[in-house]
Image (spheres, rainbow, N blue to C red):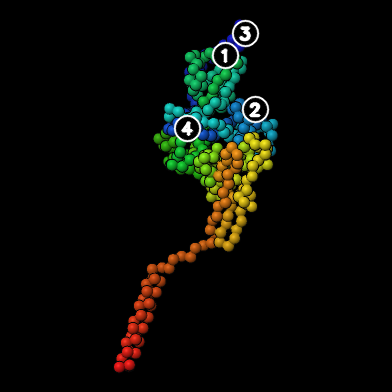
Amino acid sequence: MTINQTLLFLPIFLLFILTTTNAQPFSCKASSKCTSMIDYVSPNDTTISNITSLFGISKNLLSYLGANNLPPTTLPSFPIKAKQTVKIPFPCKCANGTGTSDGVPVYKVVPDDGLFHIASEVFGGLVLYQQIQTANNISDPNKILIGQELKIPLPCSCDEVDDEPVIHYGHIVTVGSSVEGIAKQFDTTQETLLKLNALPAPADLKAGAVLDVPLKACKSSILPTSRDYPLLVSNGSYVYTAGNCVQCKCDAANNYTLQCEPSTMKSSIWPSCPNTQCGRVFLGNGTSSGCSSTTCAYQGYDNQKILTNLTTVSTCATSSPPSSATNISSLGWRWNFLLVAVQLVLLSLHLLQ
């Protein structure tokens, strides 16, 4: 028997005992695709390279750095301490009322592996072993092959929340957390979290649960025809878009308005990055004159060019309309003036007779 034919066994009674986990699928009504995020806590000291490799996002290092608000110059060898929580961005696909990761991660079975170990230890309890079993059409959860590649169905969603586009974030609940505290931390409401996660009451929140948290996205001028539409960026993070030629960041301090500027990265789709100016104004810059301010805003990109638009905003306070009392007073003065004028005309006519 070759090593690739070796069966890995985990006693069924042990699987039965060790099934307690708080990983649950997220609701996703619409059939769509998007980018989601999820927490990951590494059991050991590791590196960014190992984590992005595990989750199948090594080619998208900048997306990992942006999600964790790390400098874009951070090296893949950057250390991650054991028990440190990091955010993993990944593609999400919605179907049949549930969202799961689209194409990644794919895990290759090694000696002494078992489905429970892979779910609870390798992927930190982000999925149930039964979910891995179903996603890979495994008839017997006690039997997997060394070298077998397993799809790992991370929970996610692409649904709007309260008619607004959001980034669904799988947040691991820590000991001592509350629904109200999590809602305040991520600028949402307790009622929204309870509804999204089908929690009857705040007291039903459990430590270790993967909670669906809707992260508010910065407002942008991205056109529906742009290749990166909709470009959703959450507070405290950034993304590279338009073939890495544009960097956009989101900061709640800027009234949740997306801030984009030219990047210094090498383009991934063009020999060199196209022009990012609005006339004489560079992307992300603006000018002020009198009572108006103009800014060169990012609108997206197509196969040939980067789309921008020069937007003008009034910066001077508008004068308030006269009050009703002022209007009445002005009207009364006009009537008095008219009456006096009429009387003077009549008096003049009388004197001429």
Three-letter amino acid code at the position of disc 1? Leu
Disc ID at residue 145: 1
In the drawing, does residue 341 fall left or right of residue 56?
Answer: left
CB-based contact (under 8 Å), mark 1 and mark 4: no
Residue 18 at x, y percent in the picture:
51, 21
Q: In terms of sequence position, does the residue under pointer 3 or pointer 1 come before the other? A: 3
CB-based contact (under 8 Å), mark 1 and mark 2: no
Task: State how far apart marks 2 and 3 are (Cα).
Answer: 28 Å
Nearer to me, 72 or 207: 72
In the drawing, does residue 146 fall left or right of residue 130?
Answer: right
Nearer to me, 156 or 261: 261
Q: Residues within 10 Å of mark 2 (few under 14, many from 20)?
A: some
Three-letter amino acid code at the position of disc 4? Ser
Q: Residues within 10 Å of mark 1 (few under 14, many from 20)?
A: some
Q: In terms of sequence position, does the residue under pointer 2 or pointer 4 come before the other? A: 4
Mark 1 falls on what kind of element?
strand
Q: Which residue is mark 3?
A: 2
Q: Which residue is mark 2?
A: 50
Nearer to me, 22 or 4: 4
